[in-house]
Amino acid sequence: MTDTETPAPQVSFVLPTSTAVARYMQLKVESVLNTPYQVTDELTPYEHVLTVSHDAKVTADLLNLPEQQAEIAIDLLEEALDGGAIEDAYGLRGGVLNVLLPMASEDLDLGLDAVLDEEDGAPTIDKFANTPNELFSSLTPAQVWVGTGPIEAQLADALLPRLWAETRELSFPTPGAANAEWLSRLRLWSYNPAGGGRGRVIDLIVAERNMLLEKRVTICHERGIDIEFLPNL
């Protein structure tokens, strides 16, 4: 994309919970930060902040995002400049595969507790970071940390309006029941072909996240930035 202004997402559907809405905004901002733009020298904003500006606000201002999205972008870019700690994978992260789940927390991750407490038999932090995690729909913490890419964002924007259209006339006793129906349909979608002979949705998402992860880790190593996420591709 080469526009000088990054467009805000056009929302034409309703999500079943407020957490899902916040997760959707998070994945949209992450996808912006993982997409090259003319205004960021044909680099992704993540690459720009790490190699050119070294200032989160300077890079974020180039994107001309709406205020709320700009605040999220600045926070994410600042995290990138600080390096990569395992705790950064939690919160509203996880992209479309996790958009309908409750917000993930370190407190709920018993595997992380074992690593941080250095319990006998616990994996090293880098192994834990590259192990599929149930809290993240079997994405690894490293894949979650690197963020949503443009392919995944396009898949999300194709799926979520369709789920809204398919379920808007259905009757649910609670918002939780509606969310469970959406989640069931999302799971089925994620393990089916994406169309165009490109393979399963989940495989496309994992491949894109792995590509982004490898590039980010390489830049961090070149810049001497400490991270706990080492790619295991």
Image (spheres, rainbow, N blue to C red):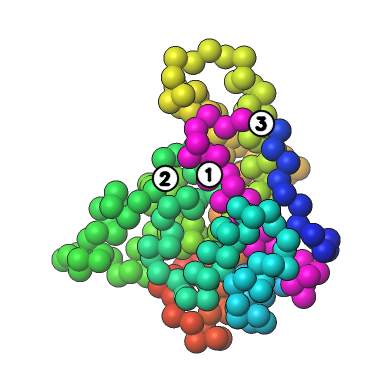
The residue beneath circle 3 is: 13
Quarter holding the N terminus is bottom right
The residue beneath circle 2 is: 103
Q: Residues within 10 Å of mark 3 (few under 14, many from 20)?
A: some
- Marks 2 and 1, how far apart at CA: 9 Å
Q: Pointers 1 and 3 in contact (CB under 8 A)?
A: no
| Residue name at image x 38 percent, y 65 percent | 86
- Furthest-right residue in this view: 3
| Residue name at image x 45 percent, y 71 percent | 84
x and y percentages locating residue 180 in the rendered image: 46, 27
Tell me the SS state at disc 1: helix
- Furthest-front residue in this view: 67
Instruction: Please tell me whether the stretch drawn in magenta is mainly helix, strand or loop.
Output: helix
Above or below, 137 relative to 64: above
For residue 228, the mark is: none
| Residue name at image x 74 percent, y 72 percent | 40
Q: Amino acid at mark 2?
A: Met
| First of labels 1, 3 by sequence position | 3
- Marks 1 and 3, how far apart at CA: 14 Å
Q: Amino acid at mark 1?
A: Ala
Instruction: Point out the stretch of residues depicted in magenta.
Output: 14-42
The residue beneath circle 1 is: 22
Q: Pointers 2 and 1 in contact (CB under 8 A)?
A: yes
| First of labels 2, 1 by sequence position | 1
Tell me the SS state at disc 3: loop
Q: Residues within 10 Å of mark 2 (few under 14, many from 20)?
A: some
| First of labels 2, 3 by sequence position | 3
Q: Amino acid at mark 3?
A: Phe
Q: Is residue 18 magenta?
A: yes
- Marks 2 and 3, how far apart at CA: 21 Å
